[in-house]
Image (tube, rainbow, N blue to C red):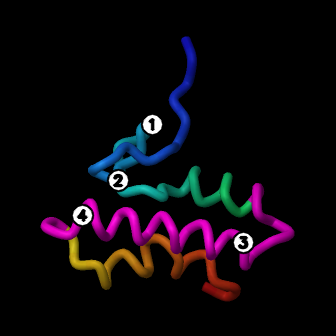
Amino acid sequence: MRRRQHLPTRPTWRCQACGIAWPCSPAKLRLLGEYREDRIGLLRHLAALQAEAAEELAQVVPSASLIERFTGWARPGG
């Protein structure tokens, strides 16, 4: 049996594998590993995803709450 990856399901932005709000902890760890030498690249990537999520979740989640969820944790010292 193949394991599901910790990727977002759209338009809900919940994790395919664990069902919690994405990025979940395993997704964050994977992203930090992938971008370990490029924190600015990680933040750009997450900001682009945050913008997509803000559009798709506009009726459900305040866009301000997506800031910490998508990029706040990835800032140095964050």
Looking at the rendered structure, the secondary structure element under dot 1 is loop
Q: Gap in Å between the C-alphas at discs 1 and 4? A: 20 Å
Is 48 placed above or below 3 here?
A: below
Question: Which badge, 3 or 2, is on the more N-terminal residue?
Answer: 2
Q: Which residue is mark 1?
A: 17
Please give the residue where the numbered disc 2 appears in the rendered image.
13
CB-based contact (under 8 Å), mark 4 and mark 3: no
Secondary element at tag 2: loop
Q: Residue at x 45, y 36 (%)?
A: 17
Q: Which residue is mark 3?
A: 41
Task: Compare residues 59 and 76 and report the one nearer the observer.
Answer: 59
What type is the residue that disc 1 sits on? Ala
Residue at (52, 43) in percent of width and height: 6
The tag on residue 65 is none
Q: Tags 1 and 3 in contact by the CB under 8 Å rule? A: no
Q: Secondary structure at mark 4?
A: loop
Q: Are marks 2 and 4 in contact (CB under 8 Å)?
A: yes
Query: Given this view, does label 1 or label 3 mark the residue nearer the observer?
Result: 3
Side of 21 relative to 60 (left or right): right
Circles 2 and 1: CB atoms closer than 8 Å: no
Type of the residue with mark 4: Leu
- 10 Å neighbourhood of mark 1: few (<14), some, or many (≥20)? some
